[in-house]
Structure formats: C-alpha cells, structure tokens
C-alpha cells in the first residue's frame, strides 16, 4: 500500500452502497424463490405422501374381536359358547407406590411369590400408561377377595376378555376339538390383519375345521394417539373424526351330534379305552363320536402349563388321541357280513349249503391249521348261522373260494382303506390289503408274495386289514342302507342371529350296485340272528326294536399254533380289542353304530352292551321325550 | 363543520397519526408490518403451545419489553449510538465471558445469565453490538476497507462469535458472524476477497468437522440423509417435513394440525414453529408469513438507503439483512434445505431474549432514519 493517505470519497461510497444493496436484493429474491420452490414441492407435489404419513402418525387401529360363533347339538343345546375370563391389570402411572402395591397383592395371594420379580420386570418393560396384566385366570374366590380390597389398590383393576366355554366339559371333545392361543405356526397360515385382536384359534375338530365361519370378522376402532403412543380423546380443541367398524360375530353352527346319545356313549365306555361312532344311515349325520379317555377342552383355552401338557401327552392311555378317527385296528369278524355279500355276489354261493365246523380249518395244500378265534365248534352251519354265530371256519372257506383280489375289490366301495370324508380332519384311511398292494408295499421280493393263508385270514378280518371305528360305523351305515349311504358329517346347519337354521343338504355317496335283494336279506337275517340267538344274543334282551349286529375280536397278539388263547393269561394291554357294529331298528334303520373297546376281549361281552345303551339313548329317548332331558334312561340298559 | 365528511375525518385522523408517529420517530409502514407479524405470530403460538395462555402472556410481556426498547432507541441519534458502540460491545463481551465462566445450564448448553428475576442471553446483545462496532469502525475510514481494516473487523466479528460458539451455540454464533460479514460486504468488500474467503470457509468446514461436538456432527449428517435415523437425530427433520407436506395448500386449520397438536413435531412452539404454520395454514399461510417478512426487510432496506452517513447506512442495512438471514435459516432448516441449527423464527418462535433484541434493532433502524438530517461528522 502506498503512503498516500486515503480520504473518504462520499460519491464513490454512495455508489458502492447502491450497488451492494441492489446485489443483496437480487440474492434475497433468489433465496426466497428457492424457499418457495421447496415449500411448493413439499406442500403441493408431495402432499399426498406426507398426508398419509401424518395419518399413520396419529391414528392407530384398535381391533374389536368378533364374538366366536356358538356350537349347538342337533337339539339346540349349547356345546361351546363364550364367557368372560377375569384378569388383574395394573397401570403403573396410576399406582402411588408400586413396590408396596405388589407386596400387598402378593400378601393377598393374588400374585405368586415366585413370579413377583417377573411381574415387576414386565411392568417396567411397558409404558407407564399401559394396562399390564399381572395375573391371569382369576377364580371366583380370588375375584371376590380382590373386590373387597379394591379401594386399597388404585391403578389396579379387574379386566375381562372373552374365552371359550364348554358347558358339558369333556363331553364330545373329540368331535368338538378345542381352541387355544394362536401359535407361531398358526400365524403362518392365517391372515394376520383379520386376526388382530383375536387371541384364540380352533386347534382340532369342529373348532379347527370351521375356524373361518366361527371366527367371524373383527371390527376396529380408530384411536387417536399422541407422539408418546398414549391414546387421547382429543388434544386441546384438536378432535378429528375417527372411524370404526363393528365386528361381525362368527356363524353359529348346528352339529349332527345328539348330546344324549353322546353322553350315553361316553358313560357306557366309562374308564375303558375305546371309541363309539353312531351315524344316522338316512343322511350321514354323526349322532355320537366318542373316544375315551378324553380331556378337558377348557384347559387349552385357558392355557396349559408345560407340566399339564406333558401329563396329557405322556399319559399311557393317550387322552389326546382321537381313537374314533385315528385309531386303526384289525376289523375282526365284523367283516363277515361284507364277506358274505361278496360270496353271494361273486360266486353265487348257496346260502343254505351246510358246512361242518369242527373248530379247525384246513387249507388244501398247507399244513397250517386255522382255528376258531374263540375256540369251540359250531357243528353244521349255513351262511345265515355262520354270520350269527360268527363261525370262522365257514368264512375261512368262503374267503378261499372268493379270492383275495375279489374281496378287496368288493370291499373298497364300503369305505375300507379310505377316509370317509367326515368334516373334521385327522382321519386315518386304515388299510385294505390286496395282492397288488402287497407287491407295492414291500421291498424284498419274498415279502411281496401274497400267500393263500393270508386270504383265509382276510375272511375273518385278521392280517393286514386295518379299520377305524368311524370307518366301521360307516360300513354299518352302508349295510343299513342296503348299499346306499351318505358321507358322514358333523355340521348340519348354520344358525343366523334370529335363531333360524339354514340346513346343509347331506352328501349322498355312490350307491353299491350289483348286490341282489336276496343277498341283502340274508345278511340282514344273519346280523339280526347275531343279536337274537348268536354271539350277541344278550343285548336284545328287553329291547323294543330289532337290532342287526355283528361282533368282532381283533387280535393284538398272535396265539401260537398249539396254544389256546386264554384271556386271563395275557397282560391287559395285549388282550384282544373288542368290536361291535350294529344298526337298528333292523327293518327301518335310524342309527348305525360301531363300538371299539381296546383290549376289551370279546366283542360280544365288552362292546355290544355299549352299543345297546347308545341305541336306546337315541331311539327310545327320541320317541319318549324329545330334546329336553339328556340323562340316560338307566332302566333300558341291560347287558 | 358542515363539510365534515367521512373522507375528511379519515384524512384528519391519518394526518394526526402521522404527526404522532413522526414525533415518536417511528416509521408507520414498518410498525404496521411488525404489528401484523406479531399478531400472526401470537395466533400461531397459541395453537403451537397447545392453547397455553401462559405462553401468550409471557410473549406479550417480551413484546412489550421489546416495544419499550424500540421506542427508547428511536430517540437515540446516530451520533450518540456511534459513541456508545464501543462501550456496548465491551460490555457484551464481558457478559459473554461471565456466562462462559459461571453459566447456568440451560438445554445442555451454557447460554443464560441469571439476573435473579430475568434470565438473559448475552449473545443476543452481541447481535446488535457486533454490527454497531463494525459500523463505528468503518465510519471514519475510506471504503472499501483496506486489508488492515479487514483484519480489525475480523477480530471485532470473530471474538464474540467464537465465544458464543464455545457455549456451544453454533446457530447464534453463525448469526452474529453473519451480521458482521453482511456489513463488511455492504461496505464494498472486494468480491475477489469474498471468493477467497468462501474457499477458506469450505476448507475451514472440513477442518472444523473434527472439532464439532458429536450432536453437531449428527445434525449435519442427518441433514444430508434424515431417513438413516428416523427416531434419533433425523426425527426433527422428518416430522417437520411431514407437518409441512401434510398441510398442503390450504392447511388443516387453526389448532387442527395433528403433527403439532399431538406432539409429533418436536420444539413445535420454538425452533419448529414454521412447520406449525405450514401444517395448519398450508402453503397460503406460509406465503403470507414470508410476504410479511419480505415487507419488513424491504422497508428496512429502503429506510437504510435514505440515511446519509456511513455508520447509519451500514448498521441499518446490516440489521435488515440479518433479519432476513434469520428467517431464511429457520425456514430452510424446517423445510429441509439447511441443517438443523438452533435458530428461532424471528418474532414468532417462543422464548429467549430475541424478541427484545429484534425490536430494539428495528428501533435503531427507525431512529437512524428519522435522525438522518441531524447527522454531523
């Protein structure tokens, strides 16, 4: 810089000010344009996007669970409904002294001492204004105890939620199924949105199969929340319009089950392991579906502890196992009416031809001796008596005459070896063996051969043949309908809110053709004979209707060639299973039934009396006092 | 008397008002602009504070204090102000040092001086003291300033700005520096030097990254990409943009902005009140607000142009432009154009001493204008 002193030049400074101010004005204008551009972008072009974000910020959907549909038996008795369960909930910010409150709740016995720490942790893991359940499933007595002391517990209150209630307890549990808490696996195949707010889901039986109609449609309520997530009614004068949608209750279902018959079946089975299935042969309605032992479905809705569940699932009697649908057993002699029909149809066997039964059957070309299952000799028998007296020797011969291929072909339409298609899941198909089946089922060539002796055993329902109680009830129903039958079903109608039932038409199955009327008559006579002079003669005593029946005994344990089966020598669990199938009244059947008693020994003594009680309950009860009293008329029962 | 029509009456009222204003050394248009802005601001604040009358009363007290300061300062002649400038400056710097040493904790930063009854931000004083001293310094010197003058100005500006930045209050520090820098720019600083300084500033920013506090770095980072931390540091920006965007053209209505009323918008009555305007009154409301601000700035610039001495012109221009910078930084921050720095929306945001200093500043501008013919050197 030079040494010349600079002096102020006012004209020049004025010029600088003017220039610079002009520049500033231009810059200000540009900055304003930028700002307005940005605001226009946000508020005009991106408005929809941000409006949606803003909506999501402030509105939460509070689901309103739909009331689960009720389940009725055929007479309108409630088998499953909903009832409130009480739980204790605590709101931290309303509790003056949390530790003292928890201590006093523990002293009252409302919180378990061992769970105190967990409870405290859970309370602190939630927001201060959340209502936290501190104790579930209060008993009536506990509700009373809390109610008395309620005034000492500000911020603690009873809350209710809907839970499933089964008024008849265990009755019909294997048909009804149960509901329990939605599991992680369930979440994979349900629509999470429509289940928001729902806590229970059907797990078995009707509850599971008709989950969709029973569940209904949940409603929702929009609630206003502030930035902390706290629900607010309004904030100052800010009170926007909130929407809601009422829930749509689930459908009420009407089942084919007749509770009186169901109770008769379960009572008659008593403590024994077994199953009873009764079907109305005129439409396929399942009147009773019992499997014993059962379990309490309410326990699942309530929530089972690990120990409780282990106890149920490890029980040697398998109470959770649905024997009616999933238990597969050899059919035993219950197969004989069908074998007889096969013989009459395929081979035109003379039903009056007498065979001499000496208690042992000798298959030509074999050294093996085929014994009467029950021992004893029947002397000369014709086909009708062979059915009535369940003569194994007669049927060994018939089976050998017909041949295994024909037997299998003939039996398939009766429903052997396939599921019946009943409207609850888990059904097992059993097994209908045939030489062709054997070729496919076994790997080693020597195992693939069908031996003639297997055909002989087939004729009396032993060997590979496996059936479920439901299948045999269906077979009884086919026999009762002379080849005409319906798909077994539990759901017969849907009831609307006004109590009007919309019936569902039964599904007829393809009728079995080609069997002569004479053949049906003969087999019917044989089966009526069984309950009058044959193996199950005892059960007709005092009956006001004619019963057509057939006993069966399924071997659990093979008797050695030169031994006799002596019941008392065999451990209880290795004893034979007892079967009885029947339909009544014999001339116009309204009920077809199959009874299985596991390790019951002989069908005639263990299973047949149960069938009688069930048929009495249905046929006599219906005739005398419709739908009112479901107690079993004891006087009718006779063994 | 007979001719006393409504028109004449209005004219008489107007002329007597003008006489009153000129007696008080006030500028009518600027006063009207400030009054409208204050009213608009109160309406917004009532909604943004969740209908808190307490907030309104406190703000009214501050406006009254500011108005008193304004009325007092309009009577100060440019010569008096110029002579007082060094003393005000030294006083302000001393206060800053006191805060630095014995500051009370307020919002995690030491900014407040507790005077018993009132809490007081000395940094606010510097917003006026820095341009006053800079104008004082340049008043007797030839313009544009030479390099020695530049050096002196740099000290005048950056000493208090540095002290405020250490509090740490980057926003106010930047505003103090801006008020000085704008003044130097108006004084005719060579544009070549400006370019060099800008380059230096960029270099300084890169170097300064290393001395920033973590929360300050977060603010810069989330400004660049707010979605990376939606619940943490990015929350402010995301929520304010939702508030603005969901307001649309016409807004959701007064006291019906869900973002603000349900407290999704943080700092809704202070730094982010601009978003409340945008949410409840929409783009229209924001344009009206910006128009008021522009009017105030334009009128102040016009008043500055009418003054005759260097001190008055530089000081008035600097105050007018700094006011605009406040508005732009706050609006830019809320709308996502600029990083989040703690700069309130002038005369609308709640709290602080800024209402008083801002109105005092406009008092100075009006005083400089009304005393323009009495200036002697």
Image (tube, coloured by chain):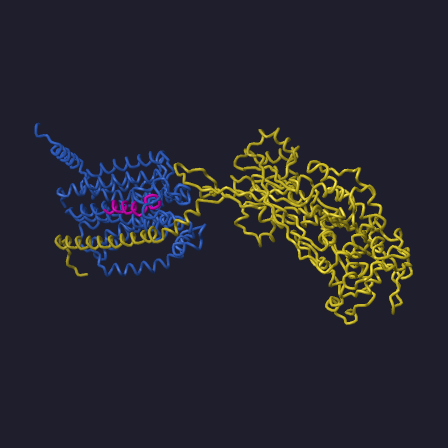
Q: Residue furthest left?
A: B2
The residue at the far bottom in this view is: A445
Q: Can residue A461 be seen by looking at this rendering?
A: yes
Residue A228 inside the magenta-drawn segment: no
Q: Quadrant of residue B193?
A: bottom left
Q: Position of residue A148 (x, y in %)?
A: 62, 28
Q: Which quarter of the image is occupied by the N terminus of chain B?
A: top left
Chain B's colour? blue
In the image: residue B227, left or right of residue A506: left
Q: Nearer the viewer, residue A87 or A364?
A: A364
Residue B289 magenta-highlighted = yes
Q: Left or right of A634: which side holds A34?
A: left
* A44 left or right of A226 in image: left
Q: Position of residue B286 (x, y in %)?
A: 30, 46
Q: Which residues are magenta?
A: B278-294
Q: Is residue A106 above or below residue A61?
A: above
Out of A412 and B303, give the one closest to the viewer.
A412
Is B204 rendered above or below residue A266? below
Say which chain is yellow.
Answer: A
Residue A311 visible in the snapshot: no
Which residue does the image show at 34% across and 58% down from the upper left?
B204
Residue B58 coordinates in the image, percent (x, y): 34, 35
Percent position (x, y) of residue B322? 26, 48
Total number of numbered discs in the rendering: 0
Quarter of the figure with residue A437: bottom right
Q: Nearer the viewer, residue A601 or A384?
A: A384
Q: Main secondary structure of the magenta part?
A: helix
User: Residue at 34% of width from left, 60% of height from top?
Assistant: B203
């Amino acid at each position: 810089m030079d040494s010349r002193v600079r002096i102020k030049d006012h004209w020049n400074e004025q010029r600088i000010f003017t220039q610079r101010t002009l520049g500033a004005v231009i810059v200000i204008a540009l900055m304003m344009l930028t700002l307005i551009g940005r605001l226009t972008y946000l508020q005009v072009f991106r408005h929809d996007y941000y409006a949606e974000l803003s909506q999501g910020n402030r509105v939460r959907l509070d689901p309103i669970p739909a009331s689960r549909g009720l389940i009725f038996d055929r007479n309108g008795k409630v088998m499953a409904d909903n009832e409130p369960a009480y739980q204790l909930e605590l709101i931290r910010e309303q509790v003056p002294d949390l530790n003292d409150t928890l201590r006093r709740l523990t002293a009252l016995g409302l919180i378990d001492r061992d769970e105190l720490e967990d409870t405290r942790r859970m309370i602190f893991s939630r927001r201060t204004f959340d209502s936290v359940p501190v104790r579930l499933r209060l008993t009536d007595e506990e509700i009373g105890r809390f109610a008395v002391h309620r005034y000492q517990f500000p911020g603690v209150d009873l809350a209710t939620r809907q839970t499933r209630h089964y008024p008849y307890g265990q009755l019909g549990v294997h048909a009804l199924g149960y509901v329990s808490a939605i599991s992680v696996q369930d979440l994979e195949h349900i629509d999470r949105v429509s289940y928001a707010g729902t806590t229970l889901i059907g797990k078995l039986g009707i509850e599971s199969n008709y989950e969709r109609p029973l569940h209904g449609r949940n409603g929702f309520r929009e609630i206003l929340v502030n930035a902390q997530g706290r629900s607010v009614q309004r904030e100052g004068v800010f009170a926007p319009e909130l929407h809601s949608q009422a829930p749509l209750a689930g459908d009420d279902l009407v089942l084919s089950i007749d509770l009186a018959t169901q109770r008769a079946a379960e009572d008659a089975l008593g403590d024994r392991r077994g199953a009873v299935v009764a079907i109305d042969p005129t439409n396929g309605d399942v009147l009773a579906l019992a499997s014993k032992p059962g379990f309490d479905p309410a326990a699942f809705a309530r929530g089972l502890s690990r120990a409780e569940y282990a106890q149920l699932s490890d029980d040697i009697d398998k109470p959770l196992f649905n024997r009616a649908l999933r238990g597969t057993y050899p059919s035993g002699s219950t197969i004989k009416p069908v074998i007889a029909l096969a013989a009459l149809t395929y081979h035109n066997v003379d039903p009056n031809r007498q065979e001499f039964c000496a208690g042992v059957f000798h298959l030509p070309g074999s050294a093996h001796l085929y014994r009467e299952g029950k021992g004893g000799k029947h002397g000369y028998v014709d086909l009708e008596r062979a059915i009535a007296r369940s003569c194994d020797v007669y049927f060994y011969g018939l089976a050998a005459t017909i041949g295994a291929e024909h037997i299998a072909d003939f039996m398939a339409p009766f429903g052997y070896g396939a599921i019946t298609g009943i409207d609850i899941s888990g059904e097992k198909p059993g097994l209908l063996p045939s030489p062709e089946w054997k070729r496919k089922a076994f790997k080693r060539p020597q195992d693939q051969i069908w031996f003639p002796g297997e055909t002989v055993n087939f004729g009396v329902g032993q060997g590979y043949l496996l059936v479920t109680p439901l299948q045999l009830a269906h077979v009884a129903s086919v026999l009762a309908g002379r080849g005409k039958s319906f798909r077994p079903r539990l759901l017969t109608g849907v009831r609307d809110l006004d109590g009007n039932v919309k019936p569902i038409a039964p599904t007829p199955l393809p009728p079995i053709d080609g069997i002569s009327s004479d053949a049906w008559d003969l087999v019917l006579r044989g089966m009526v004979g069984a309950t009058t002079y044959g193996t199950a003669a005892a059960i007709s005593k005092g009956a006001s209707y004619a019963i057509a029946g057939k006993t069966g005994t399924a071997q659990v344990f093979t008797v050695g060639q030169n031994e006799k089966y002596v019941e008392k020598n065999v451990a209880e669990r290795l004893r034979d299973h007892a079967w009885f199938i029947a339909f009544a009244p014999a001339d116009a059947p309204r009920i077809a039934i199959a009874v299985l008693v596991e390790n019951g020994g002989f069908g005639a003594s263990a299973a047949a009396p149960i069938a009688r009680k069930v048929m009495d309950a249905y046929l006599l009860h219906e005739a005398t006092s419709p739908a009112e009293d479901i107690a079993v008329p004891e006087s009718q029962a006779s063994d | 008397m007979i001719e006393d029509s409504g028109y004449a009456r209005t004219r008489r009222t107007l002329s007597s008002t003008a006489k009153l204003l000129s007696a008080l050394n006030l500028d009518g248009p600027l006063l009207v602009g400030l009054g409208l802005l204050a009213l608009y601001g109160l309406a917004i604040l009532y909604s943004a504070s969740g209908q808190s009358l307490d907030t309104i009363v406190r703000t009214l007290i501050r406006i009254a204090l500011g108005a008193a300061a304004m009325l007092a300062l309009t009577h100060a002649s440019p010569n008096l102000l110029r002579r007082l400038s060094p003393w005000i400056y030294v006083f302000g710097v001393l206060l800053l040092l006191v805060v630095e040493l014995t500051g009370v904790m307020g919002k995690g930063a030491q900014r407040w001086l507790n005077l018993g009854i009132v809490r007081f931000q000395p940094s606010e004083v510097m917003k006026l003291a820095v341009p006053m001293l800079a104008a004082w310094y340049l008043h007797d010197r030839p313009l544009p300033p030479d390099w020695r003058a530049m050096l002196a100005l740099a000290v005048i500006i950056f000493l208090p700005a540095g002290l405020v930045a250490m509090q740490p209050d980057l926003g106010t520090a930047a505003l103090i520096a801006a008020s000085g820098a704008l003044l130097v720019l108006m004084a005719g600083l060579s544009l070549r030097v400006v370019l060099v300084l800008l380059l230096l500033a960029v270099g300084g920013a890169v170097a300064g990254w290393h001395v920033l506090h973590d929360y300050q770095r977060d603010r810069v980072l989330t400004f660049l990409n707010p979605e990376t931390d939606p619940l943490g540091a990015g929350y402010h920006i995301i929520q304010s943009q939702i508030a603005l965007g969901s307001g649309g053209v016409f807004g959701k209505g007064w006291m019906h902005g869900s973002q603000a009323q349900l407290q999704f918008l943080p700092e809704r009555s202070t730094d982010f009140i601009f978003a409340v305007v945008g949410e409840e009154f929409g783009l229209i409301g924001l344009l009206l607000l910006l128009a008021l601000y522009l009017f105030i700035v334009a009128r102040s610039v016009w008043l500055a142009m009418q003054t005759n001495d260097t001190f008055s012109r530089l000081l008035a221009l600097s105050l007018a432009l700094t006011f605009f910078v406040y508005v732009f930084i706050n609006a830019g921050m809320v709308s996502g154009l600029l990083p989040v720095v703690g700069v309130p929306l002038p005369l609308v945001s709640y709290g602080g001493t800024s209402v008083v200093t801002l109105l005092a500043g406009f008092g100075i501008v009006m005083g400089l204008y009304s005393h323009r013919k009495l200036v002697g050197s």
